[in-house]
Image: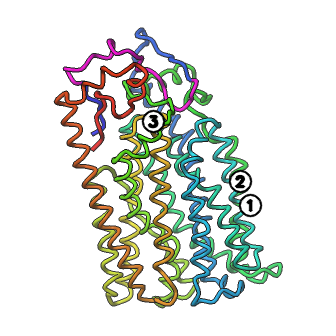
Amino acid sequence: MDVSISDPKAPQASSLPFKSNTVDHHPEAPPRYSETDVVPSPAAERRMILKVDLAVMPILFLLFLVSFVDRSNLANARIEGLEKSLHIPRTSNGYNIALISFTIPYVLFEVPANMLLKRVRPNRWLSGLMFSWGICTMGQGFTQNLGGLATCRALMGLFESGFVPGCAYLIGSYYKRHEFQFRYSIFFSAAILAGAFSGFLAYLLAKMDGVGGYEGWRWIFIIEGLITIVIAAAAFFIIAPWPEDCKFLKPPEKEMLLERLAADRGHVKHDTLTLRAFINTLTDWKIWAGMLAYFGADHSASAVVSFQPTILRELGYTASEAQIHTIPVDRLHHRYAFCMLGVTICMVGWILELAQVNPVRARYFGMFAITAGVYILMPVLVVWNLNNLGTGYRRVIGAAFQIGGGNSAALVSQNVFVSKHAPRYPEGFGTGFALNVMAGFCCTVLFLGLRAENRRRDQGLRDHRFALPREEVENLGDEHPLFRYTL
């Protein structure tokens, strides 16, 4: 549960050597609250939250949908003749090379990209990244060989690396811990809609084959890239700023927002990035457990995104039918029990694929099960991680490390689904099953470890940290004795 419990043995808030009303996300944000502030009515608070929802969520949802379409369009272009046009033999690993070219910079630059976010306005940063990868998306439509394709994909990976963790951080900056999961699940569900939208849009654009002398698969990249560029330009004027700078709320509503955020974070602060804090973040067992769980989940997601149309074609569907059948849907939930629900559903799908169950429709259902399970699991893991990382740079680094490290699973999926093993893909399906089991194991370790740590703090076994120097106490973040981890 998302609460911070005050230990009766520990010093009370008023006696602590630092203020508890520091708001995260803007390095120079000053304290804005006083003990004489009027408590807002529930109705006024609901109206304020609705304004925040409308200002923050719709545009980020749209941008994530577009980013996922751009990321997955290579799979759609493949079954429309990309390999034949670029003289990439079906028996080679050329397609996998193009996928890996995206993944490597995407993984390597997530942490530094998210650290830059703290110093740049969100609208400039997110829309700028999107505009840049939109140009690269269009470039794929004009490439003449594998080298050109791989270069465009590598640049896309570079520019997309800071997008998802940046959006997660921006969303989390506006909501209390117990409100964040619902919003991030809505945001992440754009990936599910993108699975439907991407296949359907590719199906339509492929019908432009021959227009202007370009093949249908080229138009997939050209039109989708153009759409991305236009939306990015508009998003510059729409993306919400940091809460401290927002203009869409009236002054009393803005004060209400900042005060409720400060109250939710209590004694947790982590805005000073020192070498010691950086090393402690990257060596935190909780972050590694969350990252490995995300790694197992992301392998399933990347396998679906990169190979689902191809697998469906190998099962006997035509190219057009394969595009139309890539439409996964499911609801997203939260925390450990729901993580295990996602793992279980995903496991059913991998078993069906690994066992080569007949008829083909059973394996088609398996693809849906994998998709449904993984899109329950992934957003829950991200929010679970962010809920337990305090605030400031620790959250910035931890979020990017989890998402970046987890996304490196794409390197695995891109090398276990190889053309010569079609349509059975024993290595691909077996690896997916094994990594899914690993994700469930890591979730369980995380749950048990966090529960044990909460009990230690309830017993006062971490109260000795109050004796640390003031600067260190202020920078403890989630290691503060009064902080309780979300289970």
Disc number for residue 204: none
* Residue sitting at the far left: 459
Q: Which residue is mark 3?
A: 276
Q: Residue at x 60, y 29 (%)?
A: 246
Mark pair 1, 3: CA separation: 39 Å
Disc number for residue 131: 2
Q: Residue at x 32, y 17 (%)?
A: 13
The amino acid pointed to by label 3 is Arg
Judged from the image, the secondary structure of the residue bearing numbered disc 3 is helix
Front position in the image: 174 or 481: 481
Q: Residue at x 61, y 41 (%)?
A: 116
On whether residue 20 falls in the magenta region, the answer is yes
Mark 3 surroundings within 10 Å by alpha-carbon count, few (fewer than 14), some (14 through 19), many (20 or more): few
42 sits left or right of 111 in the view:
left
Front position in the image: 83 or 290: 290
Specify how the rendered protein is coloured: rainbow
Front position in the image: 470 or 451: 470
Q: Nearer the viewer, mark 1 or mark 3?
A: 3
Judged from the image, the secondary structure of the residue bearing numbered disc 2 is helix
Question: x and y percent of residue 114 in the render?
Answer: 56, 45
Mark 1 surroundings within 10 Å by alpha-carbon count, few (fewer than 14), some (14 through 19), many (20 or more): some
Q: Quadrant of the N terminus?
A: top left
Vertical side of 53 occupied by 48: above or below = above
Question: x and y percent of residue 334 in the render?
Answer: 33, 50
Mark pair 2, 1: CA separation: 7 Å
Question: x and y percent of residue 77 in the render?
Answer: 63, 77
The amino acid pointed to by label 1 is Ile
Question: x and y percent of residue 396 in the render?
Answer: 50, 41
Does label 2 or label 3 sit earlier along the sequence? 2
Q: Which residue is mark 1?
A: 135
Badge 2 vs badge 1, beta-carbon distance below 8 Å = yes
The amino acid pointed to by label 2 is Phe
